[in-house]
Image (cartoon, grey):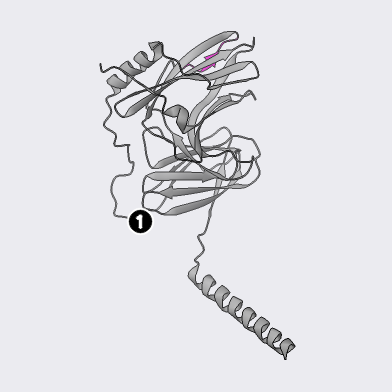
Amino acid sequence: MKKFNVLVMGYLLLMTIGVFAQQTSKNLSKIESDSLLIAYSKTTNIVFPFAIKSVDKGSPDILVQKAKGIENILQIKAAQKGFLQTNLTVVTADAKLYSFVLNYDEESPQLNLSLNKTKSEGQEIYFSDENINDEDVQEYSKLAFYDKKKLRGEKERQYDIDFSLNGIFIRDEVMYYRIKVTNISKINYDIDQLRFFIRDTKKVKRTASQEIEITPIYILNNVVKIEGEAENTFVFALPKFTIPEKKFLSIQLMEKNGGRHVELYVKNKKLVQVTVLPKL
């Protein structure tokens, strides 16, 4: 009798799992992915119908950024020639998810794409709506450059390249990040990118992690090369932001046609050590 009860219970359990699986499959709808060909030496531009809110890439072998000052254009290119197939997920302001499978094609990449609108025809490009005076931003950037107060502890040295964040300043809705790059080597350092991301806490390479790029409003001393045994101090003006728990600010410095890449990881407790610039 006991054996019979066990068999009955097992049968009922299997029936329950089967019914649940059928109900779950009915509730799920598949989101199709679009195939996208990108290159190392060319940039692919995608125009979305709404502002981009988050971007999730499946591999560090691709580079992604929003077009400067424009909220609904995404720019994509390969960071590694011949990368393995990967994916990209984008969420827009209308809470719609877009999925792309990315493949490498140096000869014939897709360069300019516009996604179908889900609303009435209207504005094609959406600019950030912060009311920021460009002239003021430039003047405050100079104040941040010459300010004597220094932030300590945010420094990284690799390949004879010193990369340090030595000042964070704020005025109104703009933050100013003072960054010093010192080339100790005798070989010139050609800058490919110096970019800011809010990221999840460190992940193992090649796993997907959510990241949001912060695009500078203005850059003071924006040189493209650090000569051998020389230095440069930049000031990056960025929209005001703070960082949630379990996230950090990543500041990436990447060498053009080289491998001397350096990265800083800055937590929120450091970002709040900010100096208020005097009003002009």
In the displayed image of the protein, which residue is found farthest to the front? 2
Residue at 63% across / 47% down in the picture? 85
**Looking at the image, which is closer to me, 30 or 183?**
183
Residue at 61% across / 45% down in the picture? 207
* On-image quarter of the N terminus: bottom right
Magenta region: 222-228
In the image, residue 226 lies in the stretch drawn in magenta = yes
Q: Image height check: is 204 above or below 170?
A: below
Q: Image height check: is 76 above or below 120?
A: above
The image shows residue 270 at horizontal and vertical percentages of: 46, 27
The image shows residue 141 at horizontal and vertical percentages of: 36, 18
Q: Is residue 148 left or right of residue 200?
A: left
**Looking at the image, which is closer to me, 127 or 268?**
268
Q: What is the crowding at mark 1: few (fewer than 14 residues within 10 Å), some, or many (at least 20)?
A: few
Q: Image height check: is 251 above or below 65?
A: above
Q: Secondary structure at mark 1?
A: loop
Residue at 50% across / 73% down in the picture? 26
Q: How many marks?
A: 1
The image shows residue 221 at horizontal and vertical percentages of: 43, 15
In the displayed image of the protein, which residue is found farthest to the right? 3
In the image, residue 42 lies in the stretch drawn in magenta = no
The image shows residue 71 at horizontal and vertical percentages of: 37, 40
Q: Which residue in the protein does label 1 denote?
A: 118
Quarter of the image where one finds residue 239:
top left
* On-image quarter of the C terminus: top left
Magenta segment, prevailing SS (helix, strand or loop): loop
Q: Amino acid at mark 1?
A: Thr
